[in-house]
Amino acid sequence: MRLTLEAKKEIVSEVAAAAANAPSAIAVEYAGITVTEMTKLRQTAREAGVYMRVVRNTLARRALENTKFECMRDGLTGPLLLAFSHGEPGSVAKVIRDFAKTHEKLVVKLVALDGKLLQPSDIDALASLPSKQQAISMLMGIMQAPIALLARTLAEPHAKLVRTIAAVRDQKQAA
């Protein structure tokens, strides 16, 4: 199917807008994936807040110009599916990694995080990044630990005094 010039410009601007707001991007080779499987992948991606689009490589190269994912331009060869995360940097990697576990024909070709091109094997590291809420809770736990230890340390002399008095009382009652 031939695309008109206006349709091509619209695709380029749509992909460029997705790339401009995304912290991470992945390009995967999807040859051999059935339509049903691709629909399931797109649905999972939509639920996770991931923008996914099959784009001709020439249009993808133009869309990635002057974005932080310009580093991916040289690797865009063959039939590729571009995926950009909108929220968490690891959300796109989680979706692709989980789907690739059950579908061997989905092959990761390019992985980029904030303008830096990573190895395709780094998708596991990107997928294991904590979400913003998880990172905040981990930070709060680390910040709270010294304060909790200080509170226990300050309360211990009083608790020790109470235990000593209780032991003396029990000893006098036994005698």
Image: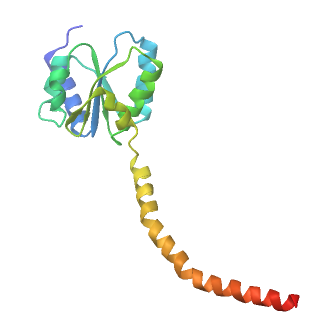
Q: Residue furthest front?
A: 175
Q: Residue furthest top?
A: 1
The spot of residue 121 in percent (x, y) is 32, 28
Residue occupying image coordinates x 28% and y 32%? 25
Residue nearest the viewer, comparing 61 with 43: 61
The spot of residue 117 in percent (x, y) is 21, 32
Residue nearest the viewer, comparing 161 with 28: 161
Q: Quadrant of residue 137?
A: bottom left
| Circle count | 0
Residue occupying image coordinates x 39% and y 36%? 127
Q: Can you say whether 100 is above or below 3 in the image? A: below
Residue occupying image coordinates x 24% and y 7%? 1
Q: Quadrant of residue 120?
A: top left
Side of 57 relative to 50 (left or right): left
Q: Can you say whether 92 is above or below 154 in the image? A: above
Q: Quadrant of residue 106?
A: top left
Residue 9 in sight from this viewpoint: no
The spot of residue 153 in percent (x, y) is 53, 78
Residue 26 in sight from this viewpoint: yes
Side of 146 relative to 111 (left or right): right
